[in-house]
Amino acid sequence: MGTKPERWIPGLNNRHCSNATRILCFPFAGGGASAFNRCAESDRDLFQLCAVQYPGRESRWGEPSFASLRDMVDAMAEDLSPLWEGAFAFWGHSFGGLVAFELSKNLLRCGFHLPECLFISAARAPHLPAREQIHHLPDAEFLQKLREFEGMSEEVMESPDLLSVVLPIVRGDFHLFEQHRAGEIKPLPIPISVFGGLQDTEVTVGDVLAWSSHTTKTFRSRFFEGNHFFAFDPRTGKQVIKYIAEDLQFPGGAPVSLAQRGALMNE
């Protein structure tokens, strides 16, 4: 199984150590660390992408899921503690955006070093109420909802054998997401950069811009042609990586004012 950090980040101990910022990448619901493989090909000297592996998939097949998102985040904060001494940032996509946000809150509460930046793609701001609950739906209805996200291949959708493996994993992540209660939310002293897909029917431009209320530091937003999984398209994915590199290199800028937040929310 390897060390605790390597359990969460496959191959971590085999990576070349450098002074580059580690970016911990948190996958979408049902996704594994391999979702970021293509993105990792764009690694630069400035940063190193380290994809996080949730339990129950890929290298952690057979491990039970956590009872709650908070339990999973608590375990991450403890198991990955050796990483909190270096330079790091978080990038979360969809469900992974909430995971990255909650882990940032945990580190702040426990007095650990904080991420240099929080990168969020295709995720609704955590204070927004859920539009609907789908994790409890019968398989046929649940699958129809997944089709609307356009994130699962038809090969999987049409294969009973593959579905029997994949569906419980996806449903389990949606359960963690939909049952999570954020409680009191205070803005984080961390710059936040958000990315959205202009054709994403599940997470709107307004949903993404609403993250502006969760930082006392710099807030940046960019939008791309594409659906909910635009960040994993080879064309737009390169642009996302480019902006991540840019924001890590030039993190400065004035904090988001209340007036600016209002303007962003009304766009």
Image (cartoon, helix red, strand yellow):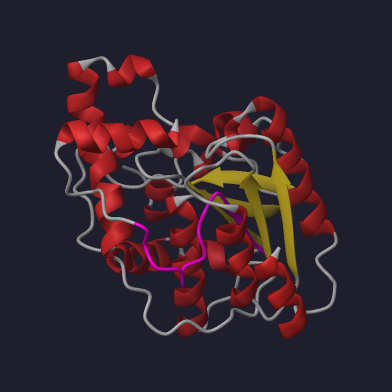
Q: Is residue 224 left or right of residue 67?
A: right
Q: Position of residue 87 (x, y in %)?
A: 67, 63
Q: Which image quarter holds the C terminus? A: bottom right
Please tell me whether residue 80 belongs to the stretch shown in magenta. no
Locate residue 140: give its quadrant: top left
Residue at the spot x=59%, y=79% of the render? 188
Q: Position of residue 155 (x, y in %)?
A: 34, 14
In front: 41, or 199?
199
In front: 208, or 250?
208
Q: Position of residue 261 (x, y in %)?
A: 70, 76
Q: Is residue 79 left or right of residue 87?
A: left
Residue at the spot x=21%, y=28% of the render? 165
Please tell me whether residue 118 belongs to the stretch shown in magenta. yes
Q: How many marks?
A: 0
State the extent of the magenta-drawn residues as a range.
117-131
- The answer, for residue 56, to whether it is visible in the render is no
Query: Magenta region, mostly helix, strand or loop?
Result: loop
Residue at the spot x=50%, y=59% of the render? 124
Q: Using the image, determine if residue 196 lies above or below residue 62.
A: below
Q: Is residue 42 left or right of residue 164?
A: right
Q: Using the image, determine if residue 151 lies above or below residue 224.
A: above
Extreme residue in the left direction: 138
In front: 212, or 199?
199
- The answer, for residue 179, to whether it is visible in the render is yes
Residue at the spot x=50%, y=61% of the render? 100
Q: Which image quarter holds the N terminus? A: top left
In front: 213, or 202?
202
Q: Position of residue 67 (x, y in %)?
A: 19, 61
